[in-house]
Image (cartoon, rainbow, N blue to C red):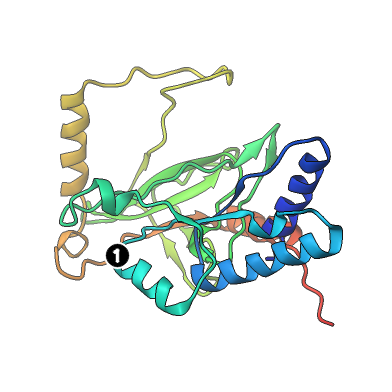
Amino acid sequence: MRSGIPNFCAVALALNELGYKASGIRLDSGDLAYLSVQVRKFFCAVEKEIGVPGFSRTFITASNDLNEETLDHLNKQGHEVDAYGIGTYLVTCYSQAALGCVFKLVEINSQPRIKLSEDVSKVSIPCKKRCFRLYGKEGYALVDIMTGENEPPPKIGERILCRHPFNESKRAYVVPQNVEELMKCYWAGKSGKLREELPPLKKIRDRCMQQLEQMRPDHMRRLNPTPYKVSVSAKLYDFIHFLWLNEAPVGELQ
């Protein structure tokens, strides 16, 4: 409400002066009913104060793993949503879990970028990165760690601090007995990097099975499995929070 909606309105009003009409917005996280009502009030205020006919009825679409139960709750709460984007529950079998995976821009013109959200789990981790899997004495994978592209990689036998990207109290030292780099370049684009050949499907399957065998049994159990940890280096942690504070809008109390 302090960033996305004001920015949308600014662009929509500028387009309106050029003869174009912005269609609407999509809400994809947070309290959809509450946010839709607040957004509609914002649109109404813009129409009233600036005098743009019809701006108060700008389209509001909602998504975010919606199902029948969610829609029922929204209707009972009261909302201002005009349309719903329903994907996962429409095209997948409920008993077969879908992998929620979204690509986010992390750098543009060599400048690290971050996506901010009131939902911390949706805040992106900026800049180009490398990712390593650290193994313990018993041969099981302990944790994955992301580092900045130019940071020195973790070394076998050297203690390294692994940090949760957003929770300052969640951290642990790890002395890896084996280190495996996970990210490889299969599409170089214009980067000039050496591109590796994508292995055949059977090799990809074999590697997947091998990786599963290197997970601790408590990670693999079907009922209440232990979440596998993905961390960031201390240097990357500091940079994330530096950029977050610099990019986050500052509220004003009146």
For the C terminus, the quadrant is bottom right
Front one among 197 and 163: 197
Q: Can the viewer see residue 31? A: no
Q: Residue at x 53, y 43 (%)?
A: 104
Q: Whole-percent x and y of residue 245?
A: 72, 63
Crowd around label 1: few <14 · some 14–19 · many ≥20 (10 Å):
few
Q: Can the viewer see residue 202? A: yes
Q: Above or below — where is 218 with respect to 205? A: below
Q: Whole-percent x and y of residue 11?
A: 76, 46
Type of residue at label 1? Glu
Left or right, 126 with respect to 8, comes to left
Q: Above or below — where is 231 with respect to 31? A: above
Q: Whole-percent x and y of residue 109?
A: 70, 31
Picture quadrant of residue 180 = top left
Left or right, 43 with respect to 118, comes to right
Q: Residue at x 22, y 51 (%)?
A: 139
Front one among 102 and 73: 73
Left or right, 93 with respect to 248, comes to left
- The residue tagged 1 is 68
Q: Residue at x 16, y 33 (%)?
A: 206
Disc 1 is placed on an element classified as helix
Q: Above or below — where is 217 with respect to 129? A: below
Picture quadrant of residue 202 = top left
Q: Above or below — where is 80 with respect to 132? A: below
Front one among 1 and 166: 1
Picture quadrant of residue 151 = top right
For the N terminus, the quadrant is bottom right
Q: Whole-percent x and y of residue 144?
A: 39, 52
Q: Residue at x 41, y 35 (%)?
A: 183
Q: Residue furthest bottom?
A: 254
Left or right, 158 with respect to 34, comes to left
